[in-house]
Image (cartoon, rainbow, N blue to C red):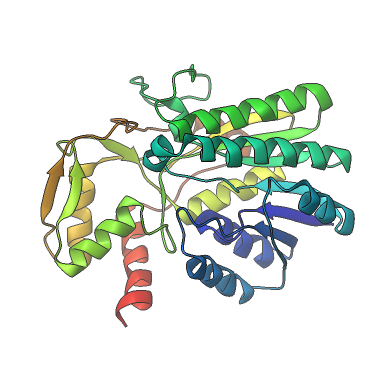
């Protein structure tokens, strides 16, 4: 029996792939190298890294393509779907809302439908802390009202959760949605703040700071996220939603100071206004994930940034 991993060539997807292979799991990876956020060569390098840890079946295809999905479930004994494929990013979703709806919602709906046709009723789906919108109550709890997203990306992620809930209501089975909180680490998307800031600081160029630096994020190291995903796979039980955060909220000012320390250069700042769609804070209540999954992040921001910097040096500077 195999796990179908969608989006397996991405940042989080490839890290989950390596963990699954290390655990001896058979994996079928589906990715279409969607070009909006990634260069193809970058995703291909992720897959090459994963190959060092075991063999897997890779299929280049789109989650919106029913023919591709039919072929996968027809030819492979899929027992569980780990659905990480999506187009991410708050800011680009504002200019391309139709693309985000098409990929994230149409793709998820088709994947759920085809999987059900083949009797697969175990799913783990990637959601996002963005579903909490401009929530000012902290920490963010899975029981909070999440009906006021502030970006198309956030709206699609909440809608993916609702599609999964409806599917469970109609067909039963086990579906867990995981709300990821600002994931960082080696192989992070180049457009993401930590990766982008590392590069600019190292090059002596100013980094864009949106707002006055008091906005804050719950940064979560990739290894902790992967451990949470694996725990979710092993503890499926009906329809569930869990926050996976780092349990440490850090202001943008502090993040820049920490990065300057790690890189060994003082960051130059280009202060800019807060863009539409951004929120002032994300802060995860992870008590439910701890109780049900045993999830407990172990990597502090300082340690995580140093690990990421070591990777950055190896890839870019040596």
Which residue is painted at 32% across and 39% down in the image?
217
Tell me how many marks there are: 0
Picture coordinates of residue 64, whole percent (x, y)? 69, 45
The answer to which of 142 and 75 lies nearer the viewer is 75
Q: Is residue 230 above or below residue 293?
A: below
Write down the quadrant of residue 74 in the picture.
Answer: bottom right
**In this image, 251 relative to 18: left or right?**
left
**In this image, 79 relative to 309: left or right?**
right
Which residue is painted at 37% across and 32% down in the image?
283
Picture coordinates of residue 196, whole percent (x, y)? 29, 58
Write down the quadrant of residue 76 in the picture.
Answer: bottom right
The answer to which of 80 and 305 lies nearer the viewer is 80
Picture coordinates of residue 54, whole percent (x, y)? 68, 73
**In this image, 31 relative to 303: left or right?**
right
Picture coordinates of residue 123, whole percent (x, y)? 72, 41
Which residue is painted at 46% across and 64% down in the image?
39
Q: Is residue 307 above or below residue 175?
A: below
Which residue is painted at 14% across and 36% down in the image?
212
From the image, which quarter does the C terminus lie in?
bottom left
The reply to whether residue 308 is visible in this rendering is yes
The reply to whether residue 285 is visible in this rendering is no
């Amino acid at each position: 029996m195999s796990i179908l991993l969608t989006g397996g060539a991405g940042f989080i997807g490839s890290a989950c792939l390596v963990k699954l292979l290390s655990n001896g799991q058979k994996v079928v990876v589906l990715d279409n190298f969607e070009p909006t956020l990634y260069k193809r060569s970058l995703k291909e390098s992720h897959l090459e890294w994963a190959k060092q840890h075991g063999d897997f079946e890779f299929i280049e295809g789109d989650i919106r393509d029913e023919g591709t999905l039919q072929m996968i479930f027809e030819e492979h004994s899929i027992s569980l779907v780990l659905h990480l494929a999506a187009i991410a990013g708050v800011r680009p979703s504002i200019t391309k809302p139709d693309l985000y709806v098409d990929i994230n919602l149409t793709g998820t709906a088709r994947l759920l439908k085809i999987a059900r046709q083949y009797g697969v009723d175990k799913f783990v789906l990637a959601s996002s802390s963005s579903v909490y919108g401009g929530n000012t109550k902290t920490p963010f709890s899975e029981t909070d009202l999440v009906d006021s997203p502030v970006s198309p990306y956030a709206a699609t992620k909440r809608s993916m959760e609702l599609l999964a809930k409806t599917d469970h209501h109609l067909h039963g089975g086990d579906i867990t949605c995981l709300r990821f909180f600002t994931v960082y680490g080696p192989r992070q998307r180049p457009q993401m703040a930590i990766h982008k800031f590392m590069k600019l600081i190292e090059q002596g160029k100013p980094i864009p700071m949106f707002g006055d630096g008091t906005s804050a994020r719950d940064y979560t190291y990739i290894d902790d996220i992967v451990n949470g995903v694996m725990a979710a796979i092993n503890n499926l039980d009906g329809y569930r939603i869990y926050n996976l955060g780092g349990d440490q909220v850090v202001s943008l000012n502090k993040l820049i100071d920490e990065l300057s320390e790690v890189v060994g250069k003082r960051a130059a700042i280009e202060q800019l206004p807060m863009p539409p769609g951004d929120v002032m804070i994300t802060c995860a209540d992870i008590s439910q994930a701890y109780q049900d999954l045993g999830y407990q992040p172990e990597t502090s921001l300082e340690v995580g940034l140093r690990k990421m910097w070591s990777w950055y040096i190896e890839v870019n500077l040596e």
